[in-house]
Amino acid sequence: MRTLFIFITLFFIQVLSAQNYSERLDLWLIEKNKRSYVPEHILFLNQQTQEYGRLSIDYTKEKGNYKKSQDAESNRKYAFSAEGFTDISKFKVYGKFTYAKTFHDKLANDLRGVKDEFNPFYFYANHPNNFQNQQYLANTLFSYELIKQRVFVGFGIDFNYNWTTGNNDPRPDVVNYFIRYKADIAWHINKHKIGVGFAYGKVTEENNIMYKNNEYKSSNKYKERFLNISLGYGDIVLSDQNLLLDRKTKENSYTFAHHYKAKKVETATLIKMSYFDQNAELNKYKQSFDVYNQFKNEQLTVQSILTFTPTENNQYQLSLKYNNYDGKNLRQIEGLNYKVDHFNANAQLLASFSKLWKNTDVQIGIDHTLYSTIRKDFAIGVYSEEKQLLNKIILNTIIDQPNHFYQFNITPLYRLKLVNDLTIPETQYTNFTDQVVIPNYQYNNDNAMGLQGEIGYGNKTWLNQYSIYLGLSGHYLQSKGQDRSSINLSLKLYL
């Protein structure tokens, strides 16, 4: 991985050597939506006609009592990130690096590091814990012109390292390491571009639980500190003698990409199918007791974006996205004991009016997302179904002057409950159903409303050709007298 980080350093040195106005690709929503396709396939990277670079330092604080049972009472996150794409010799190159440190205060019922909310097999304890997580994330993508203006080939590597620790008994020490290798090919046929891709990834994770006070491990005076392992969505087992959980996951992904551009119309489409096969082993180094668990999931992403530009100053964009998650948990003896089916579907419509008033650009839009999740625990008969519709109205205004610019963004939102059903057999209530399943059902049982927004100031002259942006953003959500809010302070350098 040392080679990967050396490349990223050299990559951003190259980006710094060019004069760019990258803030438009990050703050103007229509341009930002199109740029979000770049890391997905070389076909979209090849369409970028200007270079882009961004360095960012962020601080985020989140708190509030309107939360799910496995959310922390408060979170603090410090992050540095760098992202960009440029030309290096005969290659088009994309790179991203993030270092983040996150503190979770008073988080109960969850002793995981990297969380997959649909994977049922993990350690938990009821006692609130304080966690610290460090993350190193890197993404790269290279595109090379094999046949002039016709055929392009590409490759890339994604890397993610997470280390999570807790400071209360039981104390998790979780190391999660992920790496993915990618290969792409793209063909240019007149105004159409078509591409396919393949990726192979693997994850290794080890969660080692420790107690400083052994009395917490088994004394009935401290039941909230007992170590349990979730087996499904309600089915659990006490894990007081089994303190090591080892995971290994393999990923195979297949991608299809299409891009079309005419004088006034541009479209981009991405279809991605991913297969994950995870094997987890409890206490693999202990001869007397072993538990094996297999979790398989398939994930489908279909997304498309249509941008219409009738005039130089007006643009319209329709964005559609569908994600599906199908997971099955298989125990060595019991067979299929848990199943989850989840999907979310998003539709967003934006209209952009440049120079509406002198140097003022305005973007307005609507955004709707439908969420649906069905969980079945076959071991104890728990059934959960939930559906919500999240609705947003978007207003983004940028006053762009020769030497500086201002941004104002405000987005009211309303989450509508559509379905919220829960079935627990009378004789099958467990610690997990009482502490996790029922509180989450109550969280989803009411509608919620809120507001998110951002104000910012950018200057184009303080550092010669580079732009500096200072931003303050926030998010507020409330329901039935409970609320949760977040605030983010951001310093960005656009290269």
Image (cartoon, helix red, strand yellow):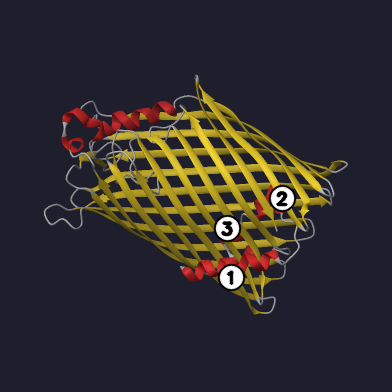
In the rendered structure, are the residues bearing label 1 and label 2 in contact, judged by CB atoms less than 8 Å apart?
A: no
Residue 47 seen in the current view: no
Residue 35 sits in quarter = bottom right
Residue 330 appears left or right of 164: left
What is the three-letter code of the residue carrying label 3?
Leu
Residue 267 sits in quarter = bottom right
Q: CA distance from mark 1 to mark 3?
A: 18 Å
What is the three-letter code of the residue carrying label 2?
Ile
Residue 224 sits in quarter = top left
Label 1 secondary element: strand
Label 1 belongs to which residue?
142
Residue appearing at x 20%, y 53% in the figure: 283
Residue appearing at x 47%, y 69% in the figure: 2
Residue appearing at x 71%, y 43% in the figure: 350
Label 3 secondary element: strand
Q: CA distance from mark 2 to mark 3?
A: 33 Å
Label 2 belongs to which residue?
468
